[in-house]
């Protein structure tokens, strides 16, 4: 169970459990197997592209620019 099921569904996260052995095994698998790493790395982000602030500022600036005219 996770609070981020969308990341697991996309394949960019894995539920491993909370035990030290489980965490070390999952991290080791990711570090040793380049195919698994590549599959997770190219999965994208379910949370956006990281450019929301710039887009919001563009909208605000456009609005303020248009309302001042």
Image (cartoon, grey):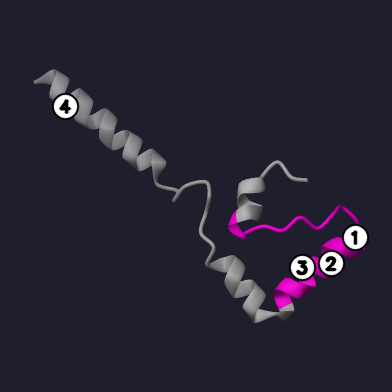
Q: State the residue position of label 3.
A: 27
Q: Is residue 6 magenta?
A: no
Q: State the residue position of label 4.
A: 65
- At horizontal 21% and vertical 25% (from top left) the residue drawn is 63
Q: Is residue 23 magenta?
A: yes
Q: State the residue position of label 2.
A: 24
The image position of residue 3, as x and y in percent, is: 70, 41
Q: Helix, strand or loop at disc 3? A: helix
Q: Helix, strand or loop at disc 4? A: helix
Decide which of tag 3 and tag 4 comes sooner along the chain.
3
Q: Helix, strand or loop at disc 2? A: helix
Q: Which residues are magenta?
A: 10-31
The image position of residue 9, as x and y in percent, is: 63, 54
Estimate the spatial distance between the alpha carbons at disc 2 and disc 3, rounded to whole Å. 5 Å
> Would residue 22 appear left or right of 33 to someone viewing this image?
right
Decide which of tag 4 and tag 2 comes sooner along the chain.
2
- At horizontal 61% and vertical 59% (from top left) the residue drawn is 12
Mark number for residue 20?
Answer: 1
């Amino acid at each position: 169970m996770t609070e981020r099921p969308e990341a697991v569904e996309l394949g960019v996260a894995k539920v491993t459990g909370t035990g030290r052995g489980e965490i070390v095994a999952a991290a080791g698998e990711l570090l040793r197997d380049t195919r698994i790493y590549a599959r997770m790395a190219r999965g994208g982000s379910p949370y956006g592209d990281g450019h929301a602030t710039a887009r919001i500022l563009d909208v605000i600036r456009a609005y303020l620019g248009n309302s001042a005219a």
